[in-house]
Amino acid sequence: MSTVAPAMRHVRGFDVARPLSIGVLVFLMLPLVFLPLASIFIFGTSNGLDKFWAALTAPEAIFALKLSMATSFWATVFNVIFGLFAAYVLSRYNFWGRNALIVTISLPTAIPTAVAGFALLLLWGPYGTLGRLLTPHGFQIMFTAGAIILANIFVTFPLAFGVIKPVFDTMSRSLEEASATIGATRWQTFWHVTLPSLRGAIVSGALLTFARAVGEFGSTILVSGNLAGRTQTAPLYIFAKFNEGQIEAANAIAIVLALFSFLIFSVLFFARDWLDVD
Amino acid sequence: MRKTISRKLPFLGLTTLILALLAGGCLPKPPGERSDITITLYGFSVMKEPLEKAIFPSFAAKWKQQHGQVLMFQSSFAGSETVTNQILRGAPADVAILSIERDVQRLQKDGFVTADWHLLPARGIVNKTPFVIIVRQGNPKDIKDFSDLAKPGIRLIHPDPISSGGAQWSILAIYGSELKKSEKESGEADAGRALQTLRAIWKNVISTPGSAREARTTFELGNGDALVTYELEGLLMKQANEPIEIVTPQATIFSEHPAVVIDRNVTAAERPVIDAFMQYLWSDEAQDAFVKFHFYSATNEAFNQANTAFGHIEMPFTIDYFGGWDKAYPEVIEKIFRDQVQRK
């Protein structure tokens, strides 16, 4: 007994490691995350709240925020449906080239986003491989909102898939089999049995995709044309304002994006439990 | 009870978020009034103020008065090389105002500019400005000329010649300034001395932002002891009460900025308004506006005389000193800067 007690102290009694490690964690995060975020808020509101509000309600700022929301929304819709479909196919069927497909879907994570933008231009641009054939017929997707959606789809491609596929992999097939034995069609089984157990994964996949797409910069600046009030998303607006030396205007929108991601990840954090418990 | 609330909260949050997302799903309409006709202009970074604050609104008002059409301008500004690359990849520009003639030549080579742009007034040059050094108030590092930037311990902000036309002007300004000074001192231009100075200066560069405007912002945020840029940038900074001083070198270059129509993107219907706009750029009204924003007019010396803020340059020179852009780009920017300064 006397030999066990000292070893157990860190489990039962007061443990110095607890406040110490929490302290170290917060201390490490301070210069890496907390202070940079804080400086956005301090800088953005340093000229008074009325200036901040004016910067936020400038027509081009509002347009940029709306454009970011809209393009990210459609990219999310596409990628969640695609991710669901891809995860279903790749976890249900075993076929030659399956691993190659899984790796390819995951690739955009590691590709620099500027390369993604450039690749899209080389394909769809008015002088690109496909674009060259389509432009004479009046089909021009680059330098429109469509190009921003395409870029968002590319860079967020693996996110929803990455969240949904593991759930498919670990899902017990006995429920689906039971459903089939009582006469459900393939579609009914998917709708009533498979999909509900994927609810949590779909929501978190969607929110992750959306959050990532809203912040996308590197590929968007290449494919969008960056015209204020037409093809300028919120991150491009921030960059343009920073370049012009209008730091307050840049920071006002940066604050909105920071709060927005805070909201998304909070919802993600709390909703996950709720969705998985049910 | 607590349990049900904590179970409902995420549900409410989620529903609100999804509704917000659905509302955001429709693409927004561009701000501003409905327009009958639009001119899309891509410009190099420091052209923004005179165009957006003076030239666009005055020309749109004129056009409305004469033709009854609402004219809207769309514009995008970045480093000259960046702008040119955007247009070459298909950005929908009708007009481009670039920092360097070399970029117009690139547009010509790929068939984007087909008309002889030198036929425009002042051979297509819309305005000009000399290159200067910006230092902190009180000039604590005692910088009086380009050669002082070569002193050890100076921290210099200089735009990136890959993306910025201003950066290329700056390199030509420094290199040409040493040639000019040696010519004056010994009667012969000393290319070795010019190369040594450029090398020593480049060692002191701590940051190469993508455009002249980005370089100015970097400097304004407190980075570096000095910045080489267009004189008008220094004058705009002074106007904004930035704690800086402008150092006018003994010898420096006047950068000359071409404005061109991107013929490939202009439809027959747009032609009249774009031609009218191009002529307007060289009108006294527009040239005077440029001078009010501290550019030198390309056509009217009287406007330039009237701007008392301009610094005095003892030995000014232009791109002709190097034999034009056809020679300056391959011989100075490529053979000297890129091969012997940057790759050292």
Image (spheres, coloured by chain):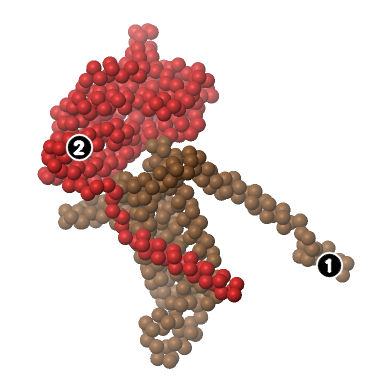
Q: Are marks 1 and 2 in contact (CB under 8 Å)?
A: no
Q: Which residue is mark 1?
A: A4
Residue B290 left/right relative to B248? left
Is residue A268 visible in the rendered structure shown here?
Answer: yes
Q: Secondary structure at mark 2?
A: helix
**Side of B324 relative to A215 (left or right):** left
The residue pinned by badge 2 equals B61
Question: Disc 1 versus disc 2: distance between alpha carbons?
Answer: 89 Å
Crowd class of label 2 (few under 14; some 14 to 19; many from 20; radius 10 Å): some
Same-chain check, marks 1 and 2: no
- Residue B201 in sight: no
Among the chains pictured, the one given brown colouring is A
Question: Which chain is represented by red in the image?
Answer: B
How many residues crowd mark 1 within 10 Å: few (<14), some (14–19), many (20+)? Answer: few
Residue A134, quarter of picture: bottom left
Q: Residue at x 16, y 29 (%)?
A: B120
Q: Image point 57% across, 45% down: which residue?
A: A35
Tell me the residue at 43%/53% (across/down).
A215
Q: Residue furthest front?
A: A50
Percent across and percent down for residue B3 are 59, 74
Placement of the C terminus of chain B among the 4 image quadrants: top left
Using the image as rendered, state which of residue B294 and residue B313 is in the foreground.
B294
Residue B289 appears in which quarter of the rendering?
top left
Estimate the x, y position of residue B337 in percent, counting from the top left.
38, 28
Three-letter code, disc 2? Ala
Label 1 amino acid?
Val
Q: Is residue B176 left or right of residue B278?
A: right
